[in-house]
Amino acid sequence: MEVIKTNDTRAVVAAVKGRVDTVTAPEFEKKISEIMDGENMPLVLDCCGLEYISSAGLRSILVISKALKPKGLAVCFFGLRGNVKDVFSISGFGSIFKIFETAEDALKSI
Amino acid sequence: MKKVSSIELPARLDQLHPFMDFAVLFASERGFAGRILQNIELCLEEALVNIFSYAYENTAGRAGIECLFEDGVLTIKVTDSGVPFDPLAVHSPDVHANMAANRIGGYGIVLIKKLTDDVRYTRENDKNILALVFVKHDGPEKSPVSSS
């Protein structure tokens, strides 16, 4: 699992790569919280390279989202595929969070 | 090729990947691939993590998986000798409820119910047995859920 931050003027864009499962979810949460420390722009998660997510990863996303809320910051997603798309759909995350097809769509919404 | 294959390991999180590697190898050797293989992994992870977290409270214990493939049907039995617990009887969270009102957790069993073709719980010989069933479909891969 890797998290890579890229710069944009409208949002903090973080690309998640690999697998977010019960073993790697704590590390994912920590990396995102480090990236968002002191930031005042919303978070856009690039899921193009995210191959697998389990309920532990969903819990991490809820924790991240709750931590950003007091700062008035939202989190949105783009590039979901395969298992990740299914898991978002089944868990209802597709209706809790804003999901976009492309980076441009996500950034335009901000 | 053997029809049945099983493994038993300590019920600890550091054993998750060895368990999953074992089942993925069994399933992929029998032609499961792509999205359905990922769904198999996911259901197995959710079932095992539930055991690691709750089956033995504060004592050490073991977990087992038994993979069986017959007539195009893969059954993975996930077992533990911990406290009797039927995960299928647990109330599922309202997945469409507002996030603030929704407690964190509980998604695992929702995923298992949705992504298996069948799932059964039994208690036999002081063991919890959760059988995850996947049917091998021929033809193009379809998403188990409608796209949204």
Image (cartoon, coloured by chain):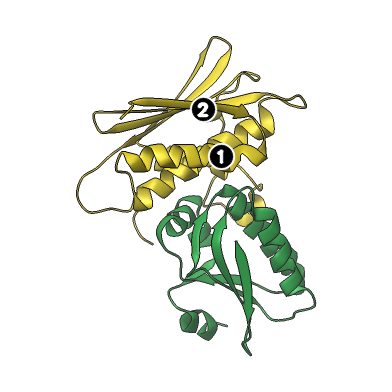
Q: Residue at x 35, y 53 (%)?
A: B34
Q: Residue at x 57, y 43 (%)?
A: B17
Residue B2, x across and y down, in percent: 33, 26
- Numbered circle sitting on residue B7: 2
Residue A33, x across and y down, in percent: 74, 67
Residue B32, x across and y down, in percent: 32, 44
Element carrying mark 2: strand
Q: Is residue B18 left or right of residue B38?
A: right
Residue nearest the observer in this picture, B94 or A61 = A61
- Toward the front, the furthest residue is B1
Q: Quadrant of residue B52?
A: top right
Residue nearest the observer in this picture, B78 or B114 = B78
Q: Is residue A98 above or below residue A28?
A: below
Q: Residue at x 66, y 47 (%)?
A: B103
Q: Residue at x 61, y 34 (%)?
A: B50
> Can the viewer see residue A108 in this picture?
yes
Q: Number of callouts in the render?
A: 2
Q: Mark 1: few, some, or many residues within 10 Å (few <14, many ≥20)?
A: few
Quadrant assignment for the N terminus of chain A: bottom right
* Chain at tag 1: B
The hue used for chain A is: green
Q: Is residue B12 left or right of residue B132?
A: right
Element carrying mark 1: helix
Q: Is residue B131 above or below residue A107?
A: above
Quadrant assignment for the C terminus of chain A: bottom right
In the image, what residue type sits under mark 1? Pro
**Mark toward the start of the polypeptide (1 vs 2):** 2
Q: Which residue is mark 1?
A: B18
